[in-house]
Amino acid sequence: MSSPRYTNSLAEEDSLYLLQHAHNPVNWMPWGDEARQKAAAENKLMLVSIGYSSCHWCHVMEQESFEDEEVAELMNRHFVCVKVDREERPDIDQIYMEAVQMMTGQGGWPLNCFTNPEGKPVYGGTYFPKQQWIQVLNQLAALWSDNPEKVNEYGDKLTQGMKVKGVLAPYDPKSEWPIDALEETVEKWKTRLDNERGGPDKAPKFPLPSNYSFLLKYGIIADDEAIRQHVKLTLNQMAIGGIYDQVGGGFTRYSTDADWKVPHFEKMLYDNAQLLSLYSEAYGAFGDAEYLHIATGIKSWLKLEMQNGKGGYFSAIDADSEGEEGKFYVWENDFLKEKFPNFSTFYQTDHRALWEGKVIPVRRGTLNELAKASVADADEVRNELQKLNDGLLLSRNERERPGTDDKSLCSWNAMLITGFATSYLHTQNEDDLTEAKKIQAFIETELMDVATLDLKHTWKKGRAKIEGFLEDFAFLIEAYLSLYEVTFEEAYLERAKELALKTLDLFYDDKTGVFFFTAHHQEDLVSRPMELSDNVIPSSNAVMAENLIKLSSYFHLPHFEAVAKRLLKAVESGMKEYGAGYSHWAMIWLRLSLGTPELVAAGEGAFSEIKKLNEYIPIVIRAAAEKKSSLELLKGRLNTDALQFYICQNRSCKQPVQSLAEAETEIKKILTRN
């Protein structure tokens, strides 16, 4: 095998995305002091080019421009070129994404941001076709040569503007959290919903699990039938559409159209971790076999394709194979007719499934709809569908597979702990709890120093690196809380509390009242990013706020709750205007509007009884102990052998009841505000 013609310094990295560019003729460098020092010494602008391994348009720009010798020569002559894996360094991505959005009004990947030698952004955009890219390179090189003072002045102003955005309004401790405000938010939200095909009334359509997790809870608690039906519609349409890999399981990143038909084919761990939680929740709420089928499919795909051999999970699977987007996942109609004659019984074969002359598997309906159409039992339909899918999967596995990004991220694996724990909560499938604990063990062994609680962000082939970001701490605390909620083992709560104290120490800023995304001692960035709005992944500030509220209940830590409420107040105006961008915050608001309800089981048989709470009870904080407990929430409640249930609201508890049925009745009164 001949050696590559070009090799740059990315060849020393272990990120798959960086390695994909290691043999470009561009003299790429990784982010770091060496690149900035080189830019200063040679008096050049830096190009910070950001993407990820499974990004289709990143591949396109690489093929068109970064592999082109003429373009590379221009880039090398005038710029110091830096490549960043956004999944390894979400902090860098946030800074330059914000800068590009401020400059252009939009963002995405590939993200290409030009900076001065200090790293201050001066120009940027996303994907550039080759000729446009050449024009941009020439124009910026000339501007820097002719008028560097003007470029630096612009960089200074833009960077200062990014910092000013982080100054938040002061918090009033007397603030209240009326549910009326949420009703107004949801009413505005309703005007942007697609009630024919589910999801938002626009394309592309992203799954956005946090949105539907909130709307599911809100629809039940507020008794809003329109919202409940919209959630069902969306989950059903996603389940039968091309965005879900009907054959192999797991969701792709988004649908390029309004019908959930044509996916952007890459599969991300963070999407599927959250969607496992969402579909498990929906199964608990509605008991629909369709939702259990999808949750089971996600888990099957994860275990088959994403396990890293150490108990954790890989990050992503590429959209492309053999140089084509989606080639691995689509089918020839003639082949299907010949080899799988019953394909059309379950799947569309006309325009509802066709894409560029190929068939994307799109189901004819949900399991219940298919059963009704064939006058068959839903279980029988599912079994026949599974047989067909097993055959299709065997056939598909003969193709060249898309690449797998084999790094494992702390934050995304922590999300998956919560996904498996949520699945266990609603199915009592012991395999789910076992899997959640395996991931926990992987994180504690490979990514955490259990003595100091220091976290690393990323792991690959036995090597952990990059100090943990706020998202790593926030989602891991959430994971420990989710494990407690299904096992009632207090060691999980103790670890969550210890990590929360560490997070406050590393990331919280008393002046602004928010958590920064990077630790106080990190110094290689031009500004410290902070996440406030929710996106495909909930804001790490929102996740921390909910963590703190729960921990405050368990341990009676008023300071934790005060921090959370101050955070929530900071996003109040944004949430009221645009609920879809603040859905995780809205869940916190919903919890506070109900007085942070708690259900405590204390005494002999508490664990087995509280696990019998079959009905879907959202928002309620649960605790249980039989003989002893270190929790403030259980203090003074274990003095008798008789099992008792305490229902609490606003730090005040009603007289205990002796049966789970009575406890459910009292909880429902709180949730329905009766």
Image: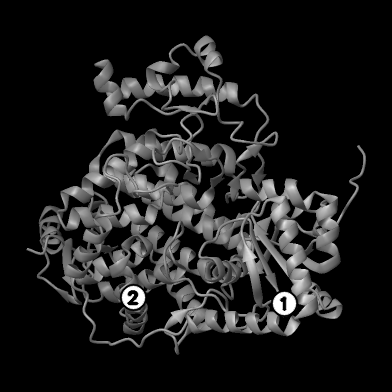
Q: Please identify the quarter of the rendering in which residue 369 is found.
A: top left
Q: Secondary structure at mark 1?
A: loop
Query: Of the residues tagged 1 and 2, which is closer to the observer?
Result: 1
Are there few (<14), some (14-19), or many (20+) residues within 10 Å of tag 2? many
Q: Residue at x 27, y 62 (%)?
A: 626
CB within 8 Å, label 1 to label 2: no
* Residue 484 image label: none
Residue 19: x and y, percent?
76, 52
**Quick one: 578 or 397, which is closer to the camera?**
578
* Residue 568 image label: 2
Q: Is residue 53 left or right of residue 3?
A: left
Residue 285 vertical placement versus 514 (above, below): above
Q: Residue at x 53, y 9 (%)?
A: 338
**Which colour style is shown?**
one colour
Q: Residue at x 37, y 74 (%)?
A: 548
- Residue type at tag 2: Leu
Q: Please identify the quarter of the rendering in which residue 449 is found.
A: bottom right
Marks 1/2: CA distance?
A: 36 Å
Residue 510: x and y, percent?
44, 88
Q: Secondary structure at mark 2?
A: helix
Residue holding disc 1: 116
**Quick one: 590 or 155, which is closer to the camera?**
155
